[in-house]
Amino acid sequence: MYRLFSFSRRLPSCAPQVGLALAVLLGGALLAAAPARAADTDELHLDAVERVEITGDAGSLTLNTSTAGPTQAHVSARRSGWFSRWYSSWFFNDCRSKSRLWVEGTVLHVSVSTPPLLEASDCTVDVTATLRPGVNVTIALQAVEAQLDGRFGAIDIDTRAGNVNLRGGMEQASLRATALRAQLDLSQSAPPRAVNFAVGSLDARLDFRPGARVGYRVEAKAALVDSERPNDPAGDTQLVVEGDYVRLVLR
């Protein structure tokens, strides 16, 4: 079932905007890259971590949750992009990121710092972590490429340009960006209480499990909503989307 809202002009796809912004801020496509310095996390105790706070410049994130196995976190910088192929032993220059991570109480802090300006175009900062289910996640980066797998608590993302993929579950989410592409696969988990988007240009898809009751409200200059679900104001999940240009798919 398609619904067209406030459609005064042809709806442009925000995919090029997201892609261009990420390419500039993240340093191009994430291609094969030479390893560089990494933060040592051997002394960190992460079993009691209840919240992750990731702040700083631009980064590529991979966050997982698991009830078994060790918890761990790792931050590193690697050379990526088209120019990475020209670096060799004759022209060695590593990605000198000052990114770091530390634990304070029950909070894992990650500070993402991109390399100096002349190196930023072909260096990417990677953050990977495996934590216990139910962890809350706060991300405040200039640009972010994020993959989240598992069961999370509250997710809060604030960025200029982002590409966010989630497979699993969460209690609630708030995502704010200038341009954002998001795919949230919630089909194998209990529905979240609330999902809120405040994005200039948004391209999003949300998959819920069969029988989930979802209510949604979209406020935008131009929006295209493709939904196979009835809009239920009393649903277990309430979705609010505010933006300029919105493409939203609900399954």
Image: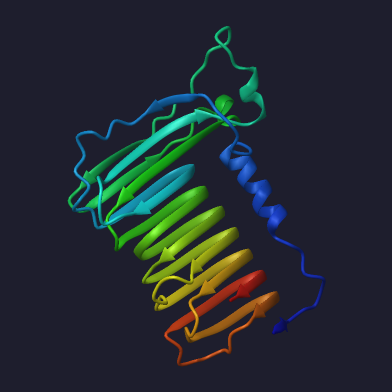
- Locate the C terminus and report the quarter of the image it occupies: bottom right
Compared across the picture, whether 8 is left or right of 118 comes to: right
Compared across the picture, whether 172 is left or right of 11 comes to: left
Q: Residue at x 54, y 69 (%)?
A: 198
Q: Residue at x 59, y 59 (%)?
A: 180
Q: Nearer the viewer, residue 197 or 40?
A: 40
- Residue 213: % across, % down: 48, 86
Q: Residue at x 36, y 71 (%)?
A: 171
Residue most extreme to the top = 90
Q: Is residue 140 above or below residue 117?
A: below
Q: Is residue 7 above or below residue 63?
A: below
Compared across the picture, whether 223 is left or right of 124 comes to: right
Q: Residue at x 23, y 45 (%)?
A: 103
- Locate the N terminus and report the quarter of the image it occupies: bottom right
- Residue 147: % across, % down: 48, 52
Q: Nearer the viewer, residue 80 or 23?
A: 80
Q: How is the image coloured?
A: rainbow
- Residue 53: % across, % down: 34, 52
- Residue 48: % across, % down: 18, 53
Q: Is residue 17 above or below residue 197?
A: above
Compared across the picture, whether 237 is left or right of 89 comes to: left
The count of marks equals 0
